[in-house]
Structures are given as structure tokens and as C-alpha cells.
Amino acid sequence: MCKKYSLLLYIFLSSHSYLSADSKDILTIRALKGDQDAQFLLGQLHLYGEKKDLQESLIWFTKAAVQGNVTACNQVARAFSLGLGTPRNASRAIHWFQRGAKTGSTESLFRLYLLHKGNGSLVRAGASLALAISQNKNPEWKEILEKMKLNFSPLELKSLEKEISDLKTKIEELPNFTRENPPLENARFQQLTFPNGDTYTGETRNGRAHGYGRKSSQHGESYFGFFENGLEEGYGLAFDSKGLVRFEGTWKRGNPLIEQPISQSKK
């Protein structure tokens, strides 16, 4: 992570003072330009700063996570696990811990172990821990796993091996982290207001949303992510008027691909 941003955030959190408007604007512009360090820091700012905004925090963590920031992956998973800025969604939490593991993070696998253990899925918990141990010979983790296996039945021990194999395959098959729409040299950072009252803040080209940005309707719904020639295109998050995640995933020509909807049920 960029040292100057880390220092800036450290000073902010240590003093419990507000980040100056100019400094925050610079950080936001860099984040909108695709700087994953700036995106992660804004997530931290909204999560731990005096003016907390869990929805904004989730937005920025997700933007950093899709570019391969492993700490951001864990923060997104934590948000879905605990319901921070979005309804609780165990499947999405699992997905993001697995995405973190895709980067080679054993911390993500250990957190996945804790999540499964908390949900009572002990065999899956054991598989996550075993896979973490195969990459990081942590003696404390090995001791935990051995104690777990002592309480497993013969059938559970057999299932454990299959779960390890399935988890490894699932992580390997996850898509690589890529930026779908790199910023263009001739893109501008602008704030736009439309005749119907909707607003847009982010990158533009020829007066249209193009690149990173956030669009908000007069009714309270919002979208944050990639745009192309004024339409949602690429990775993005849609929020309803209550600030809950309505959809997370890929968009094409202004419409979400419906295979990745977010459940609105609260657990």
C-alpha cells in the first residue's frame, strides 16, 4: 500500500479528527481513477472514521477487492458476513474469502474456516483450515485441525478429503483479478446533473459517464462502478433507496447480468 496514504489514514484514525476536504477529494479522485490503495483507504475511512458510512465503505472495499487487494477481499467478506452496509449473505461472504484465497492469502482461508465453524459446518471448516496449513505450516493451526479430526466420524474424515479437493478446485477456477475498463487518457473527472434530477460523479468522456463513477437517482437508488458511453458496463454495485445492495456483479449495456443477484433477506 502507498506509504503516504497509509500515513494519512493513520494520522486521521489516531487523532479522531476529520480528513480535510481537499485531502479527501484528492483521495477520492485517485480512487475513481482506479488506484486500489486509495480505494481501500476510503473504505477504511468510511468504516472507522468519525463519520461512518457502511454503504460507502462497502463500495470502496469492493472496488479495491476486484483489483486483487486481499485485505479488501476480507473486508468485503466480513461485511456480507456481519451485515455491514448490506444484508447478511453467507454465500457472498464465502465467495469473497475464496477470492482472497485466490491471491494466495492463508489469512483468507483461516477466516473462511472461522466462518464455517461459526455456521456449524465443521467439515468445511476443517477443509479451509487444512488448505491454509498446506500453504502456511502454522503449528497452532495444525494443532486446531488435529483436535477437530479427533471428533470427526469416519464418514466425516472421508468427506474432509473431498471438501479439501473441491475447495482447492473452486478457488483455482475463480476468475483472475482484472480491471475491466482501464481509465482512458482523455477521460475527465466531472460532476453531472441530468434533467430528471439524477446525478453522476466520476470519469466522463464527451459529457457522458465513461470509466469509474457513481450515479444516484432522485429517488435514492444508486449505482457505483464502471460506465461506457453513459451506460453501466462492467463490474458494479447497485443499491436500493434504503442503501442495501440490490445487485453485485457484471453489467452489459446498462443492464445487470442476473446470475449474481444479492438476496434481500435479512438473517
Image (cartoon, rainbow, N blue to C red):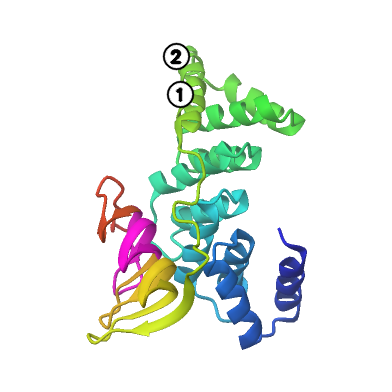
Using the image, determine if residue 95 lies above or below residue 152.
below
The answer to which quarter of the image holds residue 51 is bottom right
Identify the image quadrant of residue 7.
bottom right
Q: Which residues are magenta?
A: 225-249
Q: Amino acid at mark 1?
A: Asp
Based on the picture, tell me whether residue 118 belongs to the magenta stretch.
Answer: no
Residue at (57, 48) in percent of width and height: 68
Q: Label 2 sits on what residue type?
A: Leu
**How far across and how far down the image is residue 105, in percent?**
63, 40
- Label ID, residue 60: none
Picture disc at residue 166? 1
Of badges 2 and 1, the one in the foreground is 1
Q: CA distance from mark 2 to mark 1?
A: 17 Å
- Horizontally, residue 110 falls left or right of residue 91, namely right
**Vertical arrangement, residue 251 with respect to residue 126, above or below:** below
Q: Is residue 184 visible?
A: yes
Residue sitting at x 28%, y 58%: 264
In the image, 106 versus 176, the foreground residue is 176
Mark 2 Cα within 10 Å, few/some/many (few <14, many 20+)? few
Name the residue located 24 percent from the left edge and 49 percent from the top edge: 258
Q: Is residue 242 magenta?
A: yes
Q: Position of residue 72 (x, y in %)?
A: 57, 55
Q: Above or below — where is 187 with respect to 82? A: below
Quadrant in which the C terminus appears: bottom left
Which comes before the other along the chain, label 2 or label 1? 2
Q: Is residue 9 left or right of residue 152?
A: right
Kindly report the secondary structure that dominates the magenta region of the rendered protein. Answer: strand
Is 40 left or right of 193, judged from the image as shown? right
Disc number at residue 155?
A: 2
**Left or right for 84, reference 247:** right
Above/below status of 257 relative to 219: above
Residue 217 rendering spot, x and y as whole percentages: 28, 78
